[in-house]
Image (cartoon, rainbow, N blue to C red):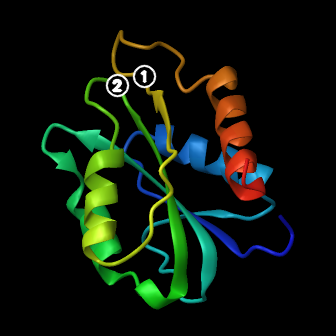
Amino acid sequence: MDNLKVAVRYFSKSGHTKKVAEAIAGALNCTAMPISVPVDAGVDLLFLGASVYWGGISSDVKEFIDKLDKDKIGKVVVFSTSALAERAFPQIKQRLQDKGIRVEERNFYCRGEFTALHKGHPNDDDLKAAKKFACAVVKGE
């Protein structure tokens, strides 16, 4: 794990994806940053977090992906949250692959709270699961 260069980027309107990003980054001894911070240095693994909204993934996420330099990214690992919609993985995966960037087949997803739905999510169990997922990916398990 120490030899891999890892970065965590996220887009979060509600703060739910940010919570998951920070849990993942904490487990991997790096810092979670919003997608407004570009990935300038080469990384072996980029953990990318987003959510699905009514119209799909945010245009901000699409723009971030479009600006990625495929020669600086070994592989992208997707994580996502949402209250109502399906996970962001299929849309993000397709956009990354269209750009020629490799995508880890495993992804992490948990519910986020929205009004009365999924109260308290992501919760401690969700964040523990996110950490476990990230560590397993990095270790190649």
Q: Earlier in the sequence, mark 2 or mark 1?
A: 2
Which disc number belongs to residue 9?
none
Query: Which sits in the foreground, 31 or 47?
Result: 47
Displayed quadrant of residue 31: bottom right
> Where's residue 112, x and y in %?
44, 27
Q: Residues within 10 Å of mark 2 (few under 14, many from 20)?
A: many
State the image coordinates of residue 34 (x, y, percent, origin top left): 49, 64
* 14 or 26, nearer to the observer: 26
Residue denoted by label 1: 113
Residue that lies at the very extreme toward the top in this rendered image? 116
Classify mark 2: helix, strand or loop. Answer: loop
- Identify which amino acid the numbered label 1 is placed on: Glu
- Residue visible at 15% across and 37% down? 54
Type of amino acid under label 2 = Ala
Residue at (62% x, 26% y) in the render: 126
User: Are there few (<14), some (14-19), or many (20+) residues within 10 Å of tag 1?
Assistant: some
Secondary element at image label 1: loop
Q: Residue at x 72, y 31 (%)?
A: 128
Pointer 2 with pointer 1, Cβ within 8 A? yes
